[in-house]
Image (cartoon, rainbow, N blue to C red):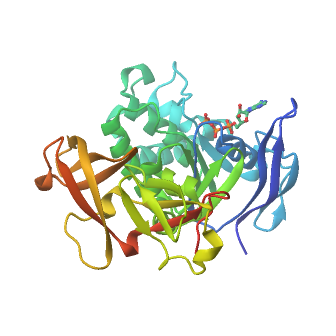
Amino acid sequence: MAYLTLKNVNKIYPNGFHAVHNFNLEIEKGEFVVFVGPSGCGKSTTLRMIAGLEDISNGDFLIDGKRANEWGPQQREVAMVFQSYALYPQMTVYDNIGFNLTLMGVDEDEIDARVRKTAAILGLTDYLDRLPRALSGGQRQRVAIGRAIIRKVGIFLMDEPLSNLDAKQRVTMRSEIAQIHRSTGATTIYVTHDQTEAMTLADRIVVMKDGYVQQIGTPYELYFKPANVFVAGFIGEPPMNFVRGKVHNGLISFGENFIDLTAWLRNPEEYENKEIVFGFRPEAIRLTGDDNAYLIHSQVELTEMLGDNTNIYITTGDKQAILKVDSHDTPETDVPLDFYIPYESVYLFDGETENVIE
Ligand code: ATP
């Protein structure tokens, strides 16, 4: 049985705004699940309903098979880390980490042992006497995480914990969070709008948009088998290229090129005169090809050499796309470029529903 279960969970705020629609998810004990999606998609609201900080308007929330809708945060045994670290500014790192245990009446020797162990896990041993204002952003975030993990709760909830850190600190803290998860084994739900964080941390990702779950899957499934245009465009950097067009005689136009879809559509006549979205990832293209690829003629508009790879912005007719190649293959700008889209890297979506065509 799943450890946490959300069954048709909905959130309708008092002003009538329906923020979360029929959310269904089962989470196994020890799993690391990431909710990802653009701002306002309902991920924090869902997390707060799991934490017991927000009422569930309808649907069921179960912990270990028991209905927990009415349980308070204490009874749910959750610890939460917020985007704002919410540390006590007048308390040392030691006291910030141990404060929850003090409130719970745990004896001082045990608090001391647990604070020191937690500090050691988080690399904070040398900072125990400092006040939060004398710490870097990354160190403060570690204290906030320490305060949460010291409680040895079964469920660990994190809402955009890295968003106040700079890019380098985020990468470091990301791997630390993964290590903490491995060492504590706590069931973790992590909210972010950053697809890289989601891909690197998650056992499974829940992609949300406008209050609706779009897809639930492993990072591999979301990248290779996106359910719809939104997920395909959200996961991956630079995002997947989409060519939208009406099918005529089994072909769609990609600027100056015609792409023959007859081999791909199980029933090509069904899509004749209908809109289709043809997708390919920037990194899937090749500069040399064979019979198992579409040859595309284009023009280089701009290149961005990023070190190990180069992004090439191309146009063909009135259409644009981004290609990602090894930086040794960086072309000149304003020159023609032929490239190949291997057949196995092609995604087709229904133009109306935007769902993938299997
Ligand atoms: P962000 O990344 O910006 O935090 P999010 O995906 O976490 O976004 P939520 O905070 O869950 O989004 O908000 C979902 C939607 O619910 C938003 O449109 C938001 O404006 C709305 N909302 C949030 N809190 C309330 C409230 N108390 N009353 C009414 N609407 C709310």
Q: Position of residue 156 (x, y in %)?
A: 60, 51
Q: Position of residue 107 (x, y in %)?
A: 61, 43
Q: Position of residue 322 (x, y in %)?
A: 33, 49
Relative placement, left or right, of 256 versus 326 is right
Which quadrant does the N terminus fall into?
bottom right
Relative placement, left or right, of 88 versus 319 is right
**Image region (quadrant) for ligand 1:** top right
Q: Vertically, is 207 above or below 138?
A: below
Q: Does the image show residue 105?
A: no
Q: Nearer the viewer, residue 159 or 302?
A: 302
Q: Nearer the viewer, residue 158 or 295?
A: 295
Q: Vertically, is 313 above or below 292?
A: above
Residue that extends furthest to the front in the rendered view of this protein = 249
Residue shown at 22% from the left, 41% from the top: 304
Q: Does the image show residue 342?
A: yes
Q: Nearer the viewer, residue 255 or 5?
A: 255
Residue shown at 54% from the left, 29% from the top: 84
Residue shown at 41% from the left, 66% from the top: 259
Q: How many marks?
A: 0
Q: Position of residue 290 (x, y in %)?
A: 24, 77
Q: Vertically, is 97 above or below 29?
A: above
Relative placement, left or right, of 210 versus 275 is right
Relative placement, left or right, of 152 versus 134 is right
Which quadrant does the C terminus fall into?
bottom right
